[in-house]
Image (cartoon, rainbow, N blue to C red):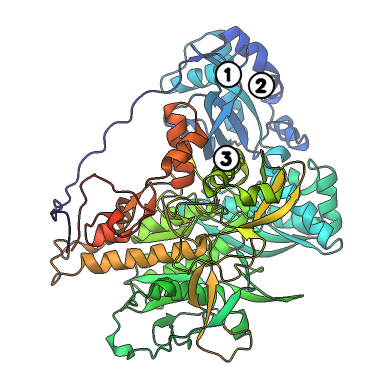
Amino acid sequence: MPQRPLLRLPNPEPIAPPRPPRGGQNIIKPSRNRQAERLAPRFDRLANVAGAAQDVMQLRMDPDAIAPERAIVFEVAGSLIDFYKHAADIGLEFLADDEMEFAPDQDFQVKGDPEDAVSGRIYLAMPDVEALRQLVRLWQRYISGRRMADGFGLWSKLFGLLKDVRPWGPQDRLSPDTLEYWSQRLQENPDEPVRFEVELWYRENAEVRARSFTAFGTTVLDFGGQIIDHAVISEIRYDAALIILPAARIRELLENPTVSLARADEIMYIRPQTMAEFSVDSDREDDPQHQVAPDRAIFLPPIAALFDGYPVQSHQRLANRLTIDDPDDFADGYVVPARKHGTEMASLILHGDLNRGEAPLQRLLYVRPVMRPIQTFDGWDERTPSDQLLIDLIYHAVRRMKEGDGGEPATAPTVILVNLSLGDPHRPFAGPMSPWARLLDYLAYRYRILFLVSAGNVRDVLSLPGYTSWNDFESASVEERERAVLEAVNENKAHRTLFSPAEAMNVITVGAAHRDGAPVRAAAMAVDPISAGNLPNVSSAVGLGFKRVVKPDILLDGGREYVRFVGTNPNLQIRPVSVSGRAFGLLAAASDPAGADLSRTALTWGTSGATALATRAGHRIFDALMDRDGGSFLADTPEQYHALLVKTLLVHGAAWGNRFEIVEEVVGGRHHFKKDGVSRLLGYGALDVMRVLECQIASNRDPGIAPNNDPLVGVV
């Protein structure tokens, strides 16, 4: 029975959002004369040639010049209201903007705190010839001190706050991460061509966009490359191509990143291919609980979808519980031994951790395969397609599911929860939002659905200052080990960030809590480094997210992940184990290596499994919301609010618990820094779904969760 009174939520009413605080930094800026001195070289050449079109076009021959049809970067201290409109007024095509920070100097600094970084914004725009002339005229008015014409006052403010103005160049297109990825690929396969993604500037005009892509395609062919795939998603201003270049051309870019393809004006970014990949190697054991699936007729339409690998649909735990939509024939060649990840995730959504013995869900699970099997030297991997842009695949998969595609009706219009236990390890979050995250934000809004996305698993080596040997670490108390590991994770937080698309703002990002239902067992040459189940396991990627929002949102069981010895150099170095030795993990249905046994189970751990459990929790919340006979006051809630309510209640059921003080001590610092530091690791806390379903006090059931004295809202 509920231990708190049930509260009736009010009916939703439209209200105007509050005005945001003006706030911001009080920036000391240079004088008009100083700006003219600093920036004159950028504009003088334009002024000298602006009179004749043929002279302006000569700028195109200089890759370092501001020129027509070449993106301009305006680096501005602070921010400007409605730059888009004012850019359009002089013929500049607005492309994008983004936040930035730069070190203070003699020209720009924060009043009262001259050592603080200066917050600013980057505005990107594409000019034509007339726009460049107009820009020069506005600049000349500014430096002469004349008043701007009506409607152009923002340009006076822009020039006064302008840190720099320059063309978008190779240093912007090629990131160090991309160069490192290429270097690794060539080390592994010195003569093999390299595939990668190119994000093009999205042009509003379809004809201009087509001409730009044609010019880009010619450039790729000139360098001996090939375009494998191309996609345009106008709703998120996405125009991208998957291309392949010979190894020799990649070496040219590694030796001199400012040459060849990096000079192409049509390109915004050059990135590693967006891809998720999983190894099929795992622990397996026989399932002693023989199960006969109930009659399919009792199952209700699906409200949850799984985008993942192809599952073993005839497994005893999954038979008659899945509806698989495979329009691209991913099943072709997907041998049963390789069907690991999708099988495990489907099992965890439907049954939870089998060691906990929960009742299965009584709805079908919609499955859309988005991975293929790849045979390796020692087995199989599962990987998203190498010949297709993954963002385009996800976009069309959701459209097909919710509204239909190619004249066909929607395949699963009742779905409101989408499980994405996928992430791109080559795109860790580093400030700008990835296209994949932008896509999820758009689709969540467009279709009123909730994506549940795994934070990612970072299984890199951790160095532990204060320990010089494995024996010392192994003999330390679990509290001492815990502090050492948390300090190491916090120290390396910049290198352990969320995998794309986990930084998306409209999704629930799920981290892995250090808990499971497995019997406690010792493991050879490995130790349990964490004492509390409400803390994250070692490999769970950390936040924060885009614009410093709380990420991950919640933690769910991800396995009591053990660590093992790697070396000493000079401090002890450890790493999460790759095989659990059946000492920990989430028990789930599994594919059989021989392809015959349909009762196999496996132990899995990490943020993928935690995300599947979060989807299951959301499913249970939805069923409670719609349970009129069970006393729910929300059974009549309009459909467009269903995903929002589930999202809200998932976060509502989370709590930091009784060990968050150790995280506070580890992150230290001032109050706002400390709060961000705790949220970086814990999000809003570890979820206890029964707090939502039954309004019970969490500590009565799970000692890993501390009591929370805030009033709880029940849904049953």
Q: What residue type is labelled 3?
A: Glu
Q: Residues within 10 Å of mark 2 (few under 14, many from 20)?
A: many
Q: Tell me which residue sits at (24%, 62%) in the image.
A: 693
From the viewer's perspective, is 47 left or right of 504?
Answer: right
Question: Which residue is denoted by mark 3 in the rendering?
Answer: 487
Q: Which disc, if any, is residue 209?
A: none
Question: Which residue is denoted by mark 1 in the rendering?
Answer: 139
Whether residue 201 is situated above or below residue 637 in the rendered picture: above
Residue 281 rendering spot, x and y as whole percentages: 64, 73
Q: Tell me which residue sits at (68%, 42%) in the image.
A: 467
From the viewer's perspective, is 134 left or right of 715?
Answer: right
Quarter of the image where one finds residue 223: bottom right
Tag 3 secondary structure: helix
Q: Distance between the residues labelled 1 and 3?
A: 51 Å
Question: Which residue is denoted by mark 2 in the rendering?
Answer: 43
Sequence-first tag of 2 and 1: 2
Do the numbered discs 1 and 3 sit on residues whose CB atoms are within 8 Å? no
Q: Distance between the residues labelled 3 and 2?
A: 50 Å
Q: How crowded is mark 1: few (under 14 residues within 10 Å), some or many (20 or more)?
A: many
Res 39 visible? yes
Tag 1 secondary structure: helix
